[in-house]
Amino acid sequence: MSRKHPVVAVTGSSGAGTSTVTDTFQQIFARESVTAAIVRGDSFHRYDRAGMRLAAEEAVAAGHGEFSHFGPDANLFLELESLFRQYGQTGSGRVREYVHDDREAAEFGQQPGTFTPWRDLPEGTDLLYYEGLHGAVQTDTVDVARYADLRIGVVPIINLEWIQKLHRDRSARGYSTEAVTDTILRRMPDYVHYICPQFANTHINFQRVPIVDTSNPFIARWIPTPDESMVVIRFADPRGIDFPYLRSMIDGSFMSRANSIVIPGGKLDLAMQLILTPLIWRLVQNSGRSSAEPNGGR
């Protein structure tokens, strides 16, 4: 655990809600006057959009049909581990951006689906914030998780994740249900071996569970709303967590296990503010960069 230069890693697969979680973290950073170096996980993919398409075609031709963004072949795990380690030691490191769309293309001056050049992180940041697929990944050759001081998992149950992917890829990308299903099947081995195990390495998991029928995600006509969901929040180490306070502040919440609290889906932002604000403040205070009381504290 780095103390002078803390690293916060939010891990979740595409569609899990990590972008919404990042919005909540940015609110906390602004309120607590924390300067964060923001790192997006897709900037550590090995291939740009065109290169990934070609690599996938070559993998299929070679009989490796499970090739996906979830696994090590399509990612720079060593470089990500190096970033976390270097930031924890020196508060510095090298990063780049992945250009997603036309808006970002105008911002960065290059085509969507490409990477910007590598650059040094700005000096004087209070912490590194990572959001992506692999913030707690461990393999035979790398251990990214060991260099993150606060590891957060954000994951829906698998049927909900599939529903979200099906709706996004069909509506935003024009894919057929059959094409998206093939993608899900192709990714499954990497999901099982490289995504799921990370949620055993996290300090806190937020898992969204729909309370409507999602038994056949491939014919679902809509994505369950937050009000049609509950969120299970699991703490790896519940010592020091004020569960009575959380239950009093979050209407409709209850304890399901000694280390887990369940909340209505619409209360996720409030719960994250209550749980994560003191943790972020503590990381920054322990780094020696701040001696102020947390603005979000009681």
Image (tube, rainbow, N blue to C red):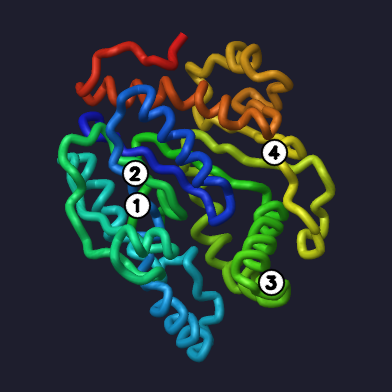
Residue type (three-letter) at the residue carrying disc 1: Asp
Q: Residue at point 22% right, 61% down?
A: 118
Q: Secondary structure at mark 2?
A: helix
Q: Which residue is mark 1?
A: 143
Q: CA distance from mark 1 to mark 2?
A: 6 Å
From this viewpoint, which residue is outermost toward the top?
Answer: 298
How far apart are the two marked residues, 1 and 4, measured between alpha carbons? 34 Å
* Residue appearing at x 55%, y 38% in the figure: 205
Q: Are marks 3 and 4 in contact (CB under 8 Å)?
A: no
Mark 2 — residue?
Answer: 146
**CA distance separating discs 1 and 3:** 31 Å
Q: CA distance from mark 3 to mark 4?
A: 24 Å
Q: What residue sits right under mark 4 in the picture?
A: 226
**Quarter of the image where the N terminus is located:** top left
In what element is the residue under mark 3? helix
From this view, report whether residue 1 is shown above or below residue 286: below
Q: Residue under circle 3?
A: 181
Which of the pair 187/109 is nearer the observer? 109
**Number of disc labels:** 4
Q: Amino acid at mark 4?
A: Pro
Under mark 2, the amino acid is Arg
Tell me the kind of residue under disc 3: Thr
Q: Secondary structure under badge 4? A: helix
Residue 120 image point, x, y percent = 17, 52
Q: Going by the image, does 30 lie left or right of 123? A: right
The circle drawn on residue 11 is none
Report if the CB atoms under discs 1 and 4 are less than 8 Å apart.
Answer: no
Q: Nearer the viewer, residue 53 or 67?
A: 53
Cα separation between marks 2 and 4: 33 Å
